[in-house]
Amino acid sequence: MDLKCKKMDCKYNDRCACISKGIKVARNCECATFEKSNKIVEEQRQDISRDMFETAPDIHPFRHNRSMSIECGAECLFNKDGLCKANGISVMNGKNAGVCITNIEP
Ligand code: SF4
Ligand code: SF4
C-alpha cells in the first residue's frame, strides 16, 4: 500500500508519507486516524521575504508499506468488506482531517 498524504500537520505524516501502521477512513472519506501534531510544519516556517520563492515540501522517497491496513467505511469501488483493496491511495489536506481522494463511487 502506497499512501501519499498532504495533511502535513498530522503527527503520522513524514514528508507526505503516512507512517501509521494502519488508518481508518470514515464514511465521508475523512481519515479518522488523523491527530494534530505539535511540530511546526515546514510550510508555516517559511519566510517568503527571505526565501523569495515558495519551496515545495520535501517528499519522502517511495515507500511501499505492505503491512498497512486501511479500514474504510466509505462507499467505494476499492472497499471490500470494510477494507481498502487499492494498491495505493492519496489523501488530501481536508478542513478537519485528511480526505481520501482515491475514492470511486461504485
Ligand atoms: S491524515 Fe491520515 S493518512 Fe494522513 S498522515 Fe495522518 S493518519 Fe496518515
Ligand atoms: S480508496 Fe476507497 S476504499 Fe480505499 S480508503 Fe479511499 S475511499 Fe476507502
Image (spheres, rainbow, N blue to C red):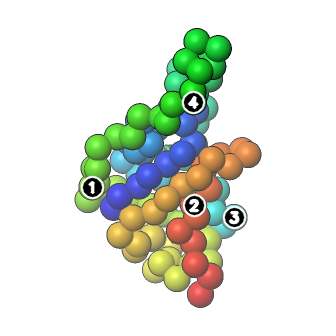
Q: Is 27 placed left or right of 14 in the picture?
A: right
Placement of 35 over or under 78, stated as above or below: above
The answer for how far apart the CA atoms under marks 1 and 4 are is 29 Å
> Who comes first in sequence, dot 2 or dot 3?
3
Residue under label 4, please give it.
54
> Who comes first in sequence, dot 1 or dot 3?
3
Q: Residue at x 54, y 55 (%)?
A: 91
- Which one is in front, 73 or 3? 3
- Which one is in front, 100 or 6? 6
| Amino acid tagged 4 | Glu
Q: Is mark 2 within 8 Å of ligand 2?
A: yes
Quadrant of the rendering where the C terminus is positioned: bottom right
Quadrant of the rendering where the N terminus is positioned: bottom left
> Who comes first in sequence, dot 1 or dot 2?
1
Q: Residue at x 63, y 63 (%)?
A: 29
| CB contact under 8 Å: marks 1 and 4 | no
Dot 4, how many residues are within 10 Å of its Cα: few (below 14), some (14-19), or many (20+)? Answer: few
Which label was assigned to residue 64?
A: 1
Q: Residue at x 68, y 49 (%)?
A: 94
